[in-house]
Amino acid sequence: MNRTIFFTTLAAGILASGSACAEWQFSAGAGVRQLQVTETDQSGRDMVQEHGWLPGVTLRADYAVRDWQVGVTGEVYRHQITYDGQMQSGVPFASDTGTTQTRVGIEVSKQVADAARLIGGIEWDRWQRDIAGRGNVLGLNERYFSWRLLAGAQMRVLQASWAQMRARALVVRSAPERLRVRFENGAFDDAHLTTQPATGMRLALDVYPTAWPKLAITTEWDWLRVGRSGDAVLFRGGVPVGFVTQAEHARRALSVRVDYRF
């Protein structure tokens, strides 16, 4: 789905629905994400590290009925980050990676105490890596797609005159990532791989300042480790010429954003 169309449609739905139902709560936010990606070989040695900052935007719509709440969220973070890797021969290779992270999710929560909610959800994740080539080293265009289940809880941890704070902890269980690789200049045919299922963790702290009742400040830490894929045959013009594998990799992200609640 085109990102512009998605966010335009969601925003239009927010504006159209806001006056029709008092139980709706809407928000739009902007923030920055510090991302680190590490790929390791079968011996556990780091082969690639990508790191950098991604600015992004978020839209969210919540609908509450008694103790239940349903939330729909969409977010996009995008920028160029640093690529520090090495060739198969062990020769270092440095470049840049154009990175886009897109996430769309649905979350259901139930209030089980005055300060506590149980949370469950499902989300679709798309991760785009455009690794620039250097010299005689080909660039790569990679697309990762996966579905994830989330489960956890939210607690109010502070109720003071100046602010309210809520903390969330979620376990993330990801289906195998489906990966498509395109090689610069069509040097090889597109390759398609599937990773192992993955388990991760997401922790967040939401701050609601009393002086600015429509604002929310969120700090979120996200971690996911994905197992090595199986070998896939690499073709050139339909003729097999070798194998390609996606290494085990870990994604770590620390995000800070400010949301405005309508």
Image (cartoon, rainbow, N blue to C red):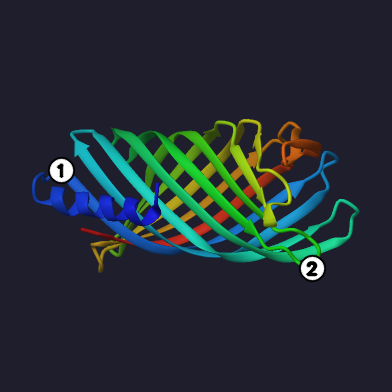
Q: Alpha carbon of mark 1 to alpha carbon of mark 2: how far?
A: 57 Å
- Numbered label attached to residue 23: 1
- Numbered label attached to residue 46: none
Between 243 and 97, the one lying in front of the other is 243
Mark 1, other Cα within 10 Å: few <14 / some 14–19 / many ≥20? few
Q: Quadrant of residue 136?
A: bottom right
Residue 238 picture location, percent across and down: 72, 36
Disc 1 and disc 2 in contact, CB within 8 angstroms = no
Residue 106 picture location, percent across and down: 35, 38
Residue 229 picture location, percent across and down: 71, 34
Q: Quadrant of residue 98?
A: bottom right
- Residue at (36% x, 58% y) in the render: 207
Q: Does residue 226 show up?
A: yes
* Residue 53 sits above or below residue 235 on the image: below
- Residue at (66% x, 53% y) in the render: 37
Looking at numbered disc 1 in the image, what kind of residue is underneath it?
Glu
Looking at numbered disc 2 in the image, what kind of residue is underneath it?
Gly
Between 45 and 214, the one lying in front of the other is 45
Q: Residue furthest right?
A: 89
Secondary element type, mark 2: loop
Secondary element type, mark 1: loop
Q: Does residue 114 show up?
A: no
Mark 2, other Cα within 10 Å: few <14 / some 14–19 / many ≥20? few
Between 86 and 23, the one lying in front of the other is 86
In what quadrant of the picture does the C terminus appear?
A: bottom left
- Residue at (84% x, 62% y) in the render: 92
- Numbered label attached to residue 135: 2
On the rendered structure, is 106 left or right of 256?
left
Whichever of callouts 1 and 2 sits on the residue coming sooner in the sequence is 1
- Residue at (25% x, 54% y) in the render: 11
